[in-house]
Image (cartoon, rainbow, N blue to C red):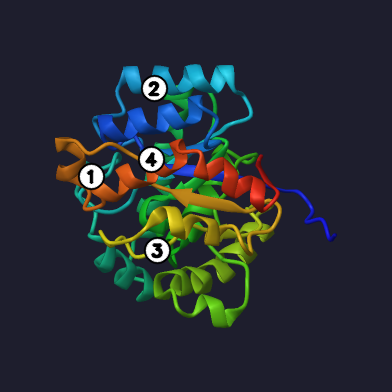
Amino acid sequence: MRVTPLRTIRICADDYGIAPGVNRAILDLLDAGRIDATSVMMLPKSLDAGAIAALAAIKQRRPTISVGLHLTLTAPFTAMTTGQPFKALKAMLLAALMRRLDGAALAAEARAQLAAFRTAFGRPPDHVDGHQHVHLFPQVRDAVLAAIAEAAPHASVRQCGRAGSWAARIADRKGLVLDILSATFRRRAARAGIATNTAFAGTYDFDGDVDFAALFPRFLDSLPDGGLVMCHPGFVDAELRRLDPLTALREREYAYFMAEAFPQALADKNIALA
């Protein structure tokens, strides 16, 4: 019988700090060993002293988990450097594609959020990625990579290119855009000497009818050793509703990761967390 080689991957929960219910869900999953990474937003008010201390305590108990910076550059948040509101996602992407962003301001904001992470946790981030994948955008990527090379040269950075055939990837339009943006991003990260994950999974249409328990095992099918799966677990509260349209599906993701079907899916595909 053919034995599938063991693959080690990371499962990273995005948006730590956005709301108390999200923080609580991510802490639960990290503490239970169901995920092994999270990305922290430095701008929301829910990243308070208690949230920082709770995450730092888990990192101390489980030093192999990756705690990184979830660089935030889109509305409804405001810039750390200027106090001005960011553009909405679509407007940000359009401005980036037209090369109409202020590169110096982007670099300053990336440095400020990296410095805020170091102040909060007493060390640079293990990895860096972007809220709504903004770190992959033209102009933004150059500013972000320069800031990482300067302030956190040993951090890895998330690229969102998927593995598998193009025929299989075309069906996911959001994923296809990320594939295209990530091709250039990977090359520039490599030139800067910054490590990236081998492949990425976890995108889907955040539709209320999605059966996440059926969807998740498919994320693992083509994921190679060193791959990364993005997820968004959380409990819905008023602060989350105020800041983000992704609400109830977070509870569905949390329930799946806590259920026994999740470790069984990893075992069936001979996958372990990194």
Q: Residue at image x 59%, y 44%?
A: 264
Indicate left or right for 21 with 14 as reference.
Answer: left
In front of the other: label 1 or label 3? 3
Q: Are marks 3 and 2 in contact (CB under 8 Å)?
A: no
Q: Earlier in the sequence, mark 1 or mark 3?
A: 1
Q: Amino acid at mark 2?
A: Ile
Compare residues 151 and 55 and report the one nearer the observer: 55
- Answer with the quarter of the image where residue 255 lies: top left
Position of the N terminus, as image quadrant, is: bottom right
The residue at which mark 4 appears reads as 254
Compare residues 77 and 168 and report the one nearer the observer: 168
Real-space CA distance between mark 1 and mark 2, rounded to the nearest whole angstrom: 20 Å
Question: Label 1: how many residues lie within 10 Å, few (<14), some (14-19) or many (20+)?
Answer: some
- Mark 2 falls on what kind of element? helix
Q: Amino acid at mark 3?
A: Tyr
In the rendered picture of this protein, how many numbered marks are placed on residues? 4
Q: Earlier in the sequence, mark 3 or mark 2?
A: 2
The residue at which mark 1 appears reads as 78
Q: Earlier in the sequence, mark 1 or mark 2?
A: 2
Q: Earlier in the sequence, mark 2 or mark 4?
A: 2
Question: Label 2: how many residues lie within 10 Å, few (<14), some (14-19) or many (20+)?
Answer: some
Indicate left or right for 172 with 46 as reference.
Answer: right
Real-space CA distance between mark 1 and mark 4, rounded to the nearest whole angstrom: 28 Å
The residue at which mark 3 appears reads as 204
Q: Is residue 176 above or below residue 41?
A: below
